[in-house]
Image: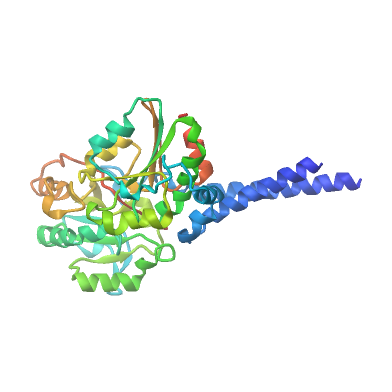
Amino acid sequence: MKLKKLITLEIAALLVVVLGFSAFTSSNNFSTIPAGYGIGDVAANINLMNVNGKMVSYSDYPNAKGFIVIFTCNTCPYAVASEDRIIALDKEFKSKGYPVIAINPNNPEVQPDDTFELMQQKAKEKGFTFPYLYDESKSVYKEYGATKTPHVYLLQKEGGKNVVKYIGAIDDNVRNGAAVKDRFLANAVNELLQGKEVSVKETKAIGCSVKV
Amino acid sequence: MKYLTLVICLICLVACADGKKEDSNAEVQILENPTAQSDLEKGTETAGNGVLNSSAVPLYNFEQLEERYLKNNNDTTYVVNFWATWCKPCVEEMPAFETVNSSYKDEKLKVILVSLDFPEKLKSLVIPFIDRKKIRSKVVLLDDPDANSWIPKTSDQWSGAIPATVVVKNGKAAFHEGTMTLEQLEKQIKTIL
């Protein structure tokens, strides 16, 4: 009887351990690539807090032809190396109808350099001319399928909807803007501006994994 | 009965050890890892000759990386991990790679840690990191800016985020994006070995 009880107890303990363990391992499987948007998908509207404390959504831009949405962050060396290029892209394309919208998807509890206050500081120091939004609920990056920073989504307005036209890198040299040979994103925007189909629709770039 | 208790204890131990690796304090992890530590104490031969390999971090372009490791048909299994010193999840999973590097010595298996740090940071960041962490796996630095061309060549499943790991042997490959526990890494290796 005593033995039986002990065995039951041990089995129960074993179960707890195994269950706990499997819960742990599954929580560790976040690395599987989220599905996210593909080319031609309609991107949902956003409503996120900008560094100036105001909420920003695509509908705030009735005259825009589309959006250059860039998931980026404060300290990832690839993001930092891209800052001047992101500012230049906004300068080049905002007036043509494609403003930059930057979104920080990182959780400051995981990546302490990505608090809202440090985002404000970054935007001020670098003189960002575009909104730098905080994905506080962590839902936007997931919906888009952004896995890293920087990660670009080019949207074009079509019948009131924002359709994904290009996904990937800013250009072919994230480390060094001066050595860029192929401006993937700028080429795509220019093709849209000329009423053409984007020829290079998807590219890959190394980036820092989104920290959530 | 006693056996069952032992098994439970063992499982508990494994679970705890595993939990420890999840600790965000990466600084202490290599020392906490029992295998890595015992190797350090032995003054180990895992790097080939007992000499820390920081003095020899070659810069390769992707073609050279392919030639040497990714497309090498010499019966060696290469565990190729893409990382960077500033990538926290990469640093966190590194003890698992170090453990594999020292524990699979007899299996013709080599761990290659491919740093994606900017080449100009080799002396100021990468080498001090290798020394500080006493890294014994082979470290190389991939100096090839056109990631759009070599990310898909490494794996069509790779979005470009790091860490990322590919295990290759004679044209067979298994890819994983994101951090891995030692168990996950060993599972990935076993699909190729």
Query: Residue A103 appears in which quarter of the rendering?
Result: bottom left
Q: Is residue A65 left or right of residue B112?
A: left
Spot occupied by residue A19 in the image (x, y as percentages of width and height)? 64, 48
Identify the residue at horizontal 14%, vertical 40% (top origin): A197
Q: Is residue A108 left or right of residue B35?
A: left
Which residue is at the front of the view, B19 or B95? B95
Identify the residue at horizontal 11%, vertical 62% (top origin): A91
Spot occupied by residue A28 in the image (x, y as percentages of width and height)? 50, 49
How is this picture coloured?
rainbow
Quadrant including the N terminus of chain B: top right
Camera sees residue B191: no
Seen as rendered, the residue at the extreme left is A194
Which residue is at the front of the view, B73 or A129? B73
Spot occupied by residue A29 in the image (x, y as percentages of width and height)? 48, 46
Q: How many marks?
A: 0
**Relative to residue A55, is residue A146 depicted above or below?**
above
Identify the residue at horizontal 14%, vertical 58% (top origin): A89
Spot occupied by residue A8 in the image (x, y as percentages of width and height)? 81, 46
Camera sees residue A174: yes
Which residue is at the front of the view, B56 or A76? B56
Q: Is residue B13 left or right of residue B184?
A: right
**Relative to residue A181, is residue A91 depicted above or below?**
below
